């Protein structure tokens, strides 16, 4: 599907705020792709589609996961909003004609992150956090600058701030978020040696 067609469809599926955020992520991902010589088209499509399953009720999230054999982890059972990432990858393929495995993977890991993320995965994860309409995350100014200097250090900073935030508010930590954090922490240590 053309990007403009996807935009039209998403405008109907998402609430106003989420649609505005989505465009913010698409253009921020584009800017990061330019800065790091990544594929611009892939970054824009992945940014546009990353939250395509966000505005589905929790009840329907569970139903759809069962219907399409998407495994639900115990942590997702308790925090069903996490499922919008896996479901987003399914929707992108099913309803938005996206077959590109890199785009689908970037959508799938955009909420928790994952060990060994590739460049597109990192660009989407970071763009989601720093896009211009975001205003609540801590250290935003610093992270926004860092994003255009070093993707791995930025991943570590966002993951660490996210874990702090979740611990403070008593949110459950998904094992994948912890694994992602440890991966980028080890990576940073190895660079120091
Ligand atoms: O969908 P968005 O709001 O644009 O962004 P997102 O998909 O990155 O989701 C962000 C939220 O996800 C943020 O409030 C932190 C939360 N999150 C990330 N990792 C975990 C988590 N929440 C829980 N409960 N557990 C996690 O491991
Ligand atoms: Fe999301
Ligand atoms: Fe998002």
Image (tube, rainbow, N blue to C red):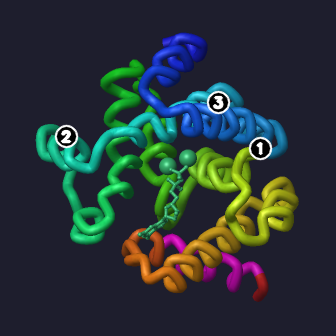
Residue 134 drawn above or below residue 67: below
Q: Residue at x 73, y 57 (%)?
A: 135
CB-based contact (under 8 Å), mark 1 and mark 3: no
Q: Tell me the residue that label 2 is attached to.
A: 64
Residue at mark 1 to residue at mark 3: CA–CA distance:
10 Å
Q: Is residue 13 left or right of residue 64?
A: right
As helix, strand or loop, the secondary structure at mark 2 comes to: helix
Q: Residues within 10 Å of mark 1 (few under 14, many from 20)?
A: many
Indicate which disc, 1 or 3, sits on the residue closer to the N terminus: 1
The numbered mark at residue 44 is 3
Q: Which residue is mark 1?
A: 32
On the rendered structure, is 180 left or right of 64? Answer: right
Q: What residue sits 40% from the left and 39% below the top?
A: 55
Q: Quadrant of the C terminus?
A: bottom right
What x and y, as percent, mark residue 139?
78, 70
Residue extent of the magenta highlight: 180-191
Mark toward the viewer: 1 or 2: 2
Q: Residue at x 26, y 68 (%)?
A: 78
């Amino acid at each position: 599907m053309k990007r403009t067609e996807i935009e039209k469809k998403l405008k109907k599926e998402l609430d106003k705020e989420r649609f505005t955020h989505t465009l913010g992520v698409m253009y921020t991902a584009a800017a990061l792709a330019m800065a790091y010589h990544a594929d611009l088209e892939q970054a824009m499509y992945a940014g546009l589609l990353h939250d395509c399953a966000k505005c589905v009720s929790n009840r329907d999230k569970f139903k759809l996961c069962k219907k399409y054999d998407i495994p639900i982890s115990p942590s997702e059972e308790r925090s069903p909003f996490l499922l919008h990432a896996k479901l987003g990858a399914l929707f992108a393929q099913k309803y938005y004609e996206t077959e590109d495995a890199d785009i689908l993977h970037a959508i799938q890991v955009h909420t928790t992150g994952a060990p060994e993320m590739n460049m597109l995965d990192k660009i989407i994860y970071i763009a989601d956090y720093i896009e211009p309409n975001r205003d609540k995350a801590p250290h935003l100014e610093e992270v926004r600058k860092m994003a255009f200097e070093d993707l791995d250090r930025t991943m570590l900073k966002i993951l660490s701030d996210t874990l702090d935030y979740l611990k403070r508010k008593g949110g459950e930590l998904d094992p994948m978020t912890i694994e992602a954090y440890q991966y980028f922490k080890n990576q940073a240590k190895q660079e120091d040696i």
